[in-house]
């Protein structure tokens, strides 16, 4: 089959997902994309540009696969003479109803409504985790009840009936090429491999490091992730205050260097207030890191029952306590791995699942 993948925000995890499916599918995936910037404008206007570009293509696909950053209703309306017989699916990386907003801000409901009408137009709605699906349908009735009349609450059940979980695919096997030949020694290395942004809650992570430092624990920390033209003040303070512990600070160039830090680290942490899947955590777990994660969001699916008391925390005090235990018992943890919990998400396993889903959609 020929599958047209519509992505108006082609960067970061969206780009990795697109490329992963394209390279591992048995079908012909051809992307139509826009640069991953100005996300609000992409949700408003990306459909106009992609519909124009789609009409200029000579060949036609067997189905459409769009992401949640596209206003699928606008795209289909602007291309209806050439897409009216095509099945369409929408893949939900995140949603604008459950995405956390900063204190003092008010949620702009228009972007959640774009997600909603896009789902109405789709033949299949795909979520990257069960947590994500559940959180969307928990919030959707609240969105619709916000409006004064004709709030279409009956559509909630209709959308749920055509929704399913299709987990994110991650190129985990690519990490194997950078696995070191010798085992790790020395103090525990704590890894942060997330964006330096509000929804990842870096302040809680840094406060935990300060507590470990004040307790006199011997540890190292590798802070990866995005760099900014102007360093966020909380990271600038941490760089000064934790200078004796820091072994890496900031973005690393290229996948190979990133992978080497994953293998070198012992503990990966998250303090996120939003995570619909958690690809960076899956990568670190695959590379042998012990995860210490909040007992919420999508993280529960990565942790077996026997490890939950070691890996999942409920509050900041428990977070620091688990980090202390992991640091003090690092040699023991180096001999064990939860890699088997994330290997099912490698593209070698997920691409056939995606293909079967697309084939079923095309046959509807």
Image (cartoon, rainbow, N blue to C red):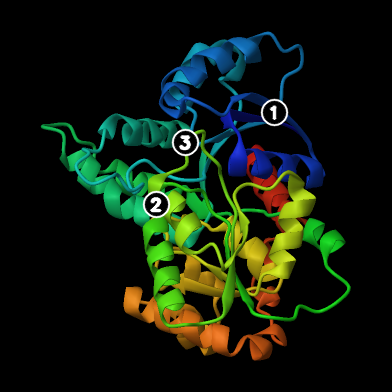
Closest to the observer: 224 or 338? 224
Question: Could one spot residue 131 in this view of the protein?
Answer: yes
Crowd band around label 2 with a 10 angstrom C-alpha radius: few (<14), some (14–19), many (20+) = few
Q: CA distance from mark 3 to mark 2?
A: 12 Å
Sequence-wise, the earlier of marks 2 and 1 is 1
Quarter of the N terminus within the rendering: top right
Residue carrying label 1: 31
Residue carrying label 2: 234
Q: CA distance from mark 1 to mark 3?
A: 34 Å
Sequence-wise, the earlier of marks 1 and 3 is 1
The secondary element bearing badge 2 is classed as helix
Closest to the observer: 73 or 97? 97
Residue 336, how many percent across, how many down? 69, 86
- Number of disc labels: 3
Residue 320, how many percent across, how many down? 41, 78
Residue carrying label 3: 230
Mark carried by residue 288: none
Q: CA distance from mark 2 to mark 1?
A: 38 Å
The residue lying at 70 percent from left, 29 percent from top is 62
- Nearer the viewer's eye, disc 1 or disc 3? 3
Crowd band around label 3 with a 10 angstrom C-alpha radius: few (<14), some (14–19), many (20+) = few
Marks 1,3: beta carbons within 8 A: no
The secondary element bearing badge 3 is classed as loop
- Nearer the viewer's eye, disc 2 or disc 1? 2
The residue lying at 26 percent from left, 33 percent from top is 108
User: Which quadrant holds residue 61?
Assistant: top right
The residue lying at 83 percent from left, 61 percent from top is 178
User: Which quadrant holds residue 327?
Assistant: bottom right
Give above or below for 306 relative to 9.
below
User: Which quadrant holds residue 14?
Assistant: top right
């Amino acid at each position: 089959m020929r599958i047209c993948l519509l992505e108006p925000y082609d960067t970061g995890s969206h780009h990795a997902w697109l490329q992963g499916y394209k390279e591992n599918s048995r079908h012909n995936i051809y992307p139509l994309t826009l640069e991953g910037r100005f996300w609000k404008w992409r949700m408003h206007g990306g459909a106009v540009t992609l519909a124009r570009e789609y009409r200029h293509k000579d060949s036609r696909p067997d189905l459409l696969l769009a992401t949640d950053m596209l206003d699928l209703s606008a795209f289909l309306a602007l291309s209806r003479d050439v897409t009216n017989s095509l099945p369409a699916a929408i893949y939900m990386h995140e949603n604008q109803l459950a995405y956390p907003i900063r204190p003092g801000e008010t949620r702009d409901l228009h972007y959640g409504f774009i997600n909603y009408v896009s789902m109405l137009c789709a033949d299949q709605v795909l979520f990257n985790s069960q947590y994500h699906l559940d959180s969307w349908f928990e919030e959707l009735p609240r969105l619709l009840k916000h409006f004064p009349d004709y709030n279409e609450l009956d559509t909630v059940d209709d959308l749920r009936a055509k929704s399913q979980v299709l987990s994110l695919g991650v190129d985990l096997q690519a990490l194997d090429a950078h696995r070191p030949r010798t085992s790790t020694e020395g103090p525990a290395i704590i890894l942060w491999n997330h964006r330096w942004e509000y929804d990842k809650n870096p302040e809680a992570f840094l406060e935990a490091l300060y507590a470990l430092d004040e307790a006199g624990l011997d540890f190292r920390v590798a802070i990866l992730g995005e760099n900014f033209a102007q360093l966020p003040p909380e990271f600038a303070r941490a760089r000064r205050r934790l200078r004796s512990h820091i072994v890496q600070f900031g973005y690393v160039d290229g996948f190979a260097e990133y992978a080497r830090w994953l293998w070198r680290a012992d503990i990966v942490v998250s303090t996120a207030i939003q995570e619909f899947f958690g690809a960076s955590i899956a990568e670190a777990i695959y590379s042998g890191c012990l995860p210490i994660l909040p007992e919420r969001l999508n993280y529960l699916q990565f942790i077996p029952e026997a490890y939950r008391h070691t890996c999942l925390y409920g509050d900041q005090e428990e977070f620091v306590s688990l980090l202390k235990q992991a640091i003090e018992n690092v040699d023991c943890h180096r001999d064990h791995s939860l890699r088997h919990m994330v290997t099912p998400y490698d593209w070698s396993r997920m691409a056939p699942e995606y293909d079967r889903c697309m084939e079923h959609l095309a046959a509807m």
